[in-house]
Image (cartoon, rainbow, N blue to C red):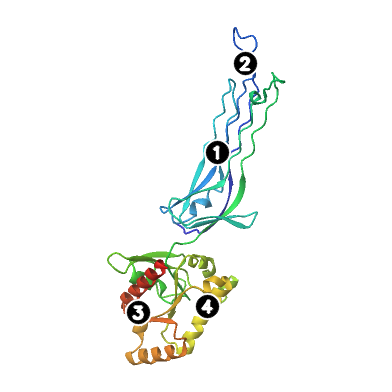
Amino acid sequence: MNFIDEAIIFVSAGDGGNGCMSFRREKNIPKGGPDGGNGGPGGNLIFSSSRNLNTLSAFRYQRSFQAQHGKKGRSRDKTGAGGQDLVVEVPTGTVVFDVGLNEQIADLNLEGQNILIAEGGTGGLGNSVYKSSTNRAPTRTSYGTRGESREVRLELRLLADVGLLGFPNAGKSSIVSAISSATPKIADYPFTTLKPSLGVVDYSLDGNFVIADIPGLISGASQGVGLGIQFLKHLSRTKLIFQVIDIFDKNCDKIIQEMEDLVFELRNYQEDLAKRERWLILNKIDLLSKEKQILLKDEITSKLDPSTKIRFISAVTNQGIKSLAKDVGSYLELQNEK
């Protein structure tokens, strides 16, 4: 199944049914009065979040959704049947924007949420409603009102605690595979990851968190270069961002420059993301000798701010992976207590 995280669709609630014009006509009742019933209300259009869905691909094929209209009122003061609500399932984590107003109208970030997106029209009034002491035989009715309709943009944002950010071939997919039970596609060439992937990390007997790998950025991503910019929105819900850098055949200055480039792309895309808690994850230390590892660690820690959290790991040999998972779990527990 293709991973689709954006879609534009048109939604319409049902119209209310018209009021009925009717007069009572029965044997042995010479003065029958008005008995036209009201129209039924139109059905609402509702979005419901579901964890059983993980992509918006279904909206590639159906782009218009219409709730049922209310029925016209009937004689004998019978109200028309109400239109049935239309419930449209979307993946949990979907944000809904009104295209015309250019504003967010819903964020379905919890399982089982039901959000009214378009309200059904009200039913019209039958002529019996207009009966009065001065108007015994009213011939007036009213039409049902139109249901709401709007063009909406759906944007799926992954529900992950930790997001991995890095340039192509930094080893993000390998980290997800090593630290969790996920099995993303991994290869020795750039642009392996073409869609986000999620993994669940069990860092203790009763503790876990969700980690997300997004396609690698390239320089200029925040200006629309490459694929990565399309997926930066998936970092918006994360509590922690891993800046993943491949340290093989790179000196300290090159590593720091790459880290700064990643922050630059984040800041250009969304200032709030650049302010998010970030850890520097230096991957592929297994490709360095013990002596080079020690020298590189000393040089990097001396040049960066002391508050910078740095982890040296190897996703291939699992060096530093278990301790990284425990550190992340402890950090998230502290955040949840605040």
Q: Upstream in the sequence, badge 3 or badge 1? A: 1
Determine whether 193 is above or below 142 in the image: below
Q: Amino acid at mark 4?
A: Val
In the image, which disc is placed on residue 263?
Answer: 4
Read off the residue under disc 1: 43
Q: Amino acid at mark 3?
A: Ser
- Secondary structure under tag 3 reads loop
Q: Is residue 186 visible?
A: no
At x 49%, y 61%, the residue is: 157
At x 62%, y 13%, the residue is: 25
**Distance between the alpha carbons at the discs numbered 2 and 3:** 85 Å
Q: Upstream in the sequence, badge 2 or badge 1? A: 2
Tell me residue 202's x, y (percent): 31, 67
Crowding near the residue tagged with mark 1, few <14, some 14–19, many ≥20 C-alpha atoms within 10 Å: many
Crowding near the residue tagged with mark 3, few <14, some 14–19, many ≥20 C-alpha atoms within 10 Å: many
At x 52%, y 37%, the residue is: 84
The one of 197 and 163 positioned closer to us in this rendering: 163
